[in-house]
Amino acid sequence: MMIEVVKLVAPFAGWLAPLEAVPDPVFAERMMGDGFAIDPIEGVLRAPAAGEILSVPATAHAVTLRLDNGAELLLHIGLETVALGGKGFVAKVAAGQRVAAGDPLIEFDLDAVAEAAKALITPVVLASEGYVLTLEATGRRVEAGESVARIARAAPREASRETANEERFEREVIVSAAHGIHARPAARITAALRPFVAEVALIAGDKQANARSTVALLGLGVGRDSAVRVTGVGADARAAVDAVAELILSGLGEEGGVVPAAPAIRTQGPVCASPGLAIGEALQLRAADQDVPDNGANPADERAALDAALAKVTGHLAGARGAAAAIAEAHRALLEDPELIRVAGEHIAAGRSAGFAWRAASGQAAAAIRATGDALLMERVADLKDLERQVIAALLGTDGESVPALRAGTILIADDLLPSQFLSLDAASLAGICTAAGGPTSHVAILAASAGVPMLVAAGDSVLAIADRTALILDADAATITVEPNPDALAQASERLSATRERHTRDIAAAHEPCRMADGTRIKIFANLGSVTDAAAAVAAGAEGCGLLRTEFLFLERDTAPVEEEQRDTYSRIAATLGDRPLIVRTLDIGGDKPVPYLPMGNEENPALGLRGVRLSLARPDLMRLQLRAILRGVPASQCRIMLPMIADLGDYRPVRALLDDVRAELGIADPVQLGVMIETPAAAMLAGQIAREADFLSIGTNDLTQYTLAADRGNAAVSQRIDALHPAVLRLIREVGKGAQAAGRWAGVCGGLASDPLAAPILIGLGITELSATPAAIPGLKAAVRRLDMNACVKLAGKACDAESPAEVRALAREALA
């Protein structure tokens, strides 16, 4: 059978980029499928090829299109645009409509959406299996209708088996992930197979599972240290099997690879899922399923309704951040699971409604997982139930089950709590959670721990009989819950809770005082900022200044560069918010890794090593001059510090120094303005002493310095796990910076991610760092940690850390020193 090929054209004019350029792991890591992205410069999304509209959500921020060769495309305008609720979007098509290439699909207000969304960059994703996408050259501007890719339909598997060159391959591997193949690792396996067409299966004992199905993989019940065979059949079987096998051998992306196993779930008595202590009143959450009709209208309509509901729930998951993001990744995999969809499709074909079919498929999958007898895997049943309810709510057009209004100091009790329910709760009123079922590694437990909410799980059915408004003490640290505690127990718990709160309050109150070590050494604690809002948060947290203002937030996600007045106004508002605190403004740090449409550049094979940072500014002195003018006009000279990114040597520094002096004279500013550099390249670190003799200060960007030192691209998932700023090689470079700054009488700081880690503080200080610029939220705890340090001890610890053999050894030394 001939393979059918469909040519894709650009759906609008803009900057064509690979999917990896999308600042969202759901798209960048191809969790939803292969594809590409365009950063648009016009407000009309057009059809990239002829086909049929499958769905357009009510928010009109996306559209799903079935091409003439059967491939399905998802076009998603911007990131986190579902949160706009349809504001700024107008759908020009509806489900079932036939369109030709170039037909308008969605019109949107480019400026309004750009201002409200996380980003305008638009992913175009191949959302169906059995197709191969071939992308043309990226890193270039394209016009609407210009050829950008093609999609080929692979031959049916039955046909390929008849050919003589059919490839068969298998490998046996040991699962090293701490909890085996549970939801998140299973999602990563299915995602790893997206680029391949081979049929791949995992075999454990006498069980076999489709490796593209998260549900089927969970049904294997594979735990840590289990042996599994990975088998493949197809044209690229060897590559597909190797990809899965290597992923399993690498630890399946779980934190730290092999980690200590979670405590076993007990049949009696609660288990701690999130530490802490809570005193409050009980409130029972009794969930109920919504009724769905048994029978459907006709199979085509019911399948279309199910597809639309799945797309809607998937869209809601796209906005997840923090701890919820990893959970959303697993939930997306379940929504796309071929086994779930196949079973639901069979029920629909038999005349059942979409809601009935999805509930039946979810129930069948849950039963298969329970049959494994694995307590950790059974925690994933809650995820299936959560998605079952969300999809049915989408089908019925309701909000689903509502969570109760909480009074202050509520301890919520439930049979089990679903992630979506937790995210809907009023966190300010939630004191603690206790569930009859569940487990300590469930997804809701992860959310509770991230939010700092004490939580007990597996407490048994007896807790479901506790009446609402009953007084409770929930001690997650001791894994106990006390019903109607006596006055003595209440007094003791209150005293503990007060001591914890007082310590936190002291840290916050003390955060507004200058930071000095136990021996009196002054260490400045600044904040990294990216907006006026960040500046207000930093002041509230006790920041002593801004150690890094990322000015590129003004330049990205727009069609033209910001004019001088816009920049000046923004810098002025941030300076005013900081009061008289120092403000270090980093000049524009964009380039091939962060392209903008108004600065056309040639395609760079390795943008991280290309025309970026100060290199781009020197290539465009007009932009540099304009930005320097805006900074000097917006920030008082006594408060202003300017910092240059991506310096390699003095040859990068001196031209800007001359330009700054020229702009100062032009504006009639007599007072000197400090001009410092970011140390992000090993070259600059090794030449720190030389640079410090002319630069006014040095500030280390540990994120880039680490990737350049360890030759590991932090945007490349295949090697990003190698990046660790506490690597001894990185610490030795930081030591060179500290020595060079001290010899020249300059100060040296750290504004990279490492500065926010209290564990790293004594090492950095021991290496000669006198200023740490952290995230605003980290400042109170960081100051409290620094105040307990002694300089002599820090110097000794830093020396040992530089002589260590690995980042793990460095961390062990730091923990021992701080114990």
Image: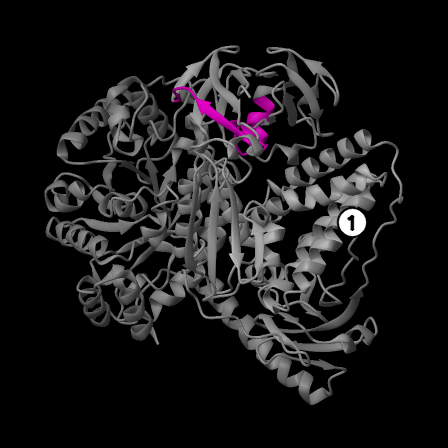
Task: Pick the quarter of the image with the N terminus.
Answer: top right
Residue 362 colored in magenta in the image: no
Left or right, residue 488 beside residue 258: right
Task: Pick the quarter of the image with the C terminus.
Answer: bottom left
Question: Residue 177: x percent and y percent?
Answer: 45, 61
Q: What residue is at 62 percent from the left and 58 percent from the top?
A: 219
Residue 131 colored in magenta in the image: yes
Question: Residue 567: x percent and y percent?
Answer: 42, 26
Mark 1 falls on what kind of element? helix
Vertical relation: 501 (above or below) 233? below
Question: Residue 514: x percent and y percent?
Answer: 36, 60
Vertical relation: 358 (above or below) 609? below
* Badge 1 amino acid: Arg
Q: Which residues are magenta?
A: 111-138
Q: What residue is at 18 percent from the left and 50 percent from the top?
A: 737
Relative to the observer, which residue lies in front, 127 or 773?
A: 127
Vertical relation: 772 (above or below) 310? below
Characterize the local packing of mark 1: few (<14), some (14-19) or many (20 or more) Cα atoms within 10 angstroms. Answer: many
**Residue at the disc numbered 1:** 359
Relative to the observer, which residue lies in front, 373 or 311?
A: 373
